[in-house]
Image: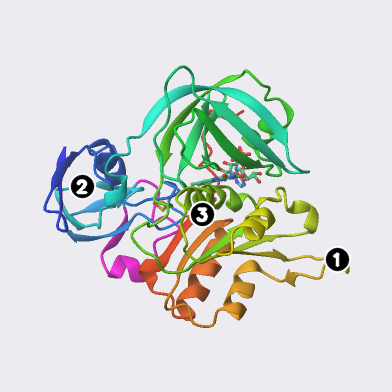
Amino acid sequence: MYTVLNQVSGKSFQCGSDQTVLDGALSNGFNFPYGCQNGFCGQCKAVILNGEIDYDEGNPEAISDDDIEANMALLCQCKAKSDLYIAVDEIDSLANIQIRSMPCRVEEVNHLNHDVVQLILKIPGSQSLQYLAGQYLDIEHPEFEPRAFSIANAPVNSNLLELHIRLVEGGQFTNFVFNALTEKTILRIEGPKGSFFLREESDCPIIFIAGGTGFGPIKAIIENLILMNSSRTVYLYWGVRTEQDFYLNLPSEWSEKHSNISFIPVLSEPDSSWSGMSGYVHEVVMKDFENLIDFEVYACGPPVMVKAAAKSCIENNLKKENFFSDSFEYANVGSTDE
Ligand SMILES: Cc1cc2nc3c(=O)[nH]c(=O)nc-3n(C[C@H](O)[C@H](O)[C@H](O)COP(=O)(O)OP(=O)(O)OC[C@H]3O[C@@H](n4cnc5c(N)ncnc54)[C@H](O)[C@@H]3O)c2cc1C
Ligand code: FES
């Protein structure tokens, strides 16, 4: 066991040498920021002020040579090799949110279009899951490694959870969901997880950039804003390849009903009948907003889109601390999957 002391809070926790520093922090009730937990998204990056860490399988993708030079480490991947002194800004809003594992029943499997299923899960009895709109959960099934999916409905004390699941070509679990999962199946979920949620303390205008099923957690956040009667100005850019990839008409309904919400659909491979915006979704946002200094941006979807959006937003003057994202990385598939 090693002691990990956070300079920012002055608090410390004990971390086993066989667990990642992030796991040590979360299991001790520390609200460290993180996203994919796979070493890809970079959201768990922190400065190691003193002490030794190591990675089991070499340096992960999201850590650059410059990061290592600056003593940065990916807490979801590194293990302590000595006592550590680190600097991490904890997220206050997560203080009362507990990660739990519980069974749930598949209530509905709705095919929304050619490659997206809406899964409605029911938590049994009087239980409910406390989460912040935008967070995700892991689905556990005995035949598969856990897979991450964002919760697509706002938390309203209901015991129903909505997920939007895109079929991945050659993907084991998503093919199972599409072809074999039936209503009444019992699954397990673990959550809520992640740091993608609305920063309610701010009232500046928000730009949401969604790619494909990255719309799911953004839907939950916008539903929450509507429930709160928020008057914040919202621009929702939803990018997909072709028109048939839009799997819900809700954004148009929101923008018709709420004068503070604008919806801009974007196609990257439009046909000649499309009269809306075309191109990569983040590039369309950058053309519309050359100066993002007064904005918050929430981006969610494929990793390549999230990375490109982060880079372009910063180039267009967005303050780094006003960029929030969830990157839909694939799971690190282990040997359990057949
Ligand atoms: C925080 C988070 C939230 C997410 N939320 C959502 C969401 O709301 N909706 C959604 O649709 N998705 C979401 N995702 C993505 C989702 O988790 C993945 O699409 C899902 O895990 C894919 O599972 P699968 O078993 O179908 O694919 P896998 O079997 O894991 O395979 C994925 C892809 O990788 C390829 N592959 C697998 N193993 C290898 C290998 N060894 N070498 C090379 N290629 C390989 C496969 O052929 C396939 O193309 C989220 C991801 C994260 C991290
Ligand atoms: S890289 Fe650590 S949470 Fe994504």
Q: What type is the residue that disc 2 sits on?
A: Lys
Residue 327: assigned label: 3
Residue position marked by numbered label 1 in the rendering: 271
Q: Nearer the viewer, mark 1 or mark 3?
A: 1
Residue 81: assigned label: 2
Q: Position of residue 157 (x, y in %)?
A: 44, 32
Give the alpha-carbon distance from disc 1 to disc 2, as whole Å: 56 Å
Q: Nearer the viewer, mark 3 or mark 2?
A: 3
The vertical placement of 331 against 190, above or below, is: below
The picture quadrant for ligand 1 comes to top right
Residue shown at 64% from the left, 67% from the top: 281
Classify the position of the N terminus by image quarter. Answer: top left
Q: Nearer the viewer, mark 1 or mark 2?
A: 1
Residue 281: assigned label: none
Pick whichever of labels 1 and 2 is earlier in the sequence. 2
Mark 3 surroundings within 10 Å by alpha-carbon count, few (fewer than 14), some (14 through 19), many (20 or more): many
Q: Position of residue 131 (x, y in %)?
A: 41, 39
Q: Note whether ligand 1 is within 8 Å of mark 3.
A: yes
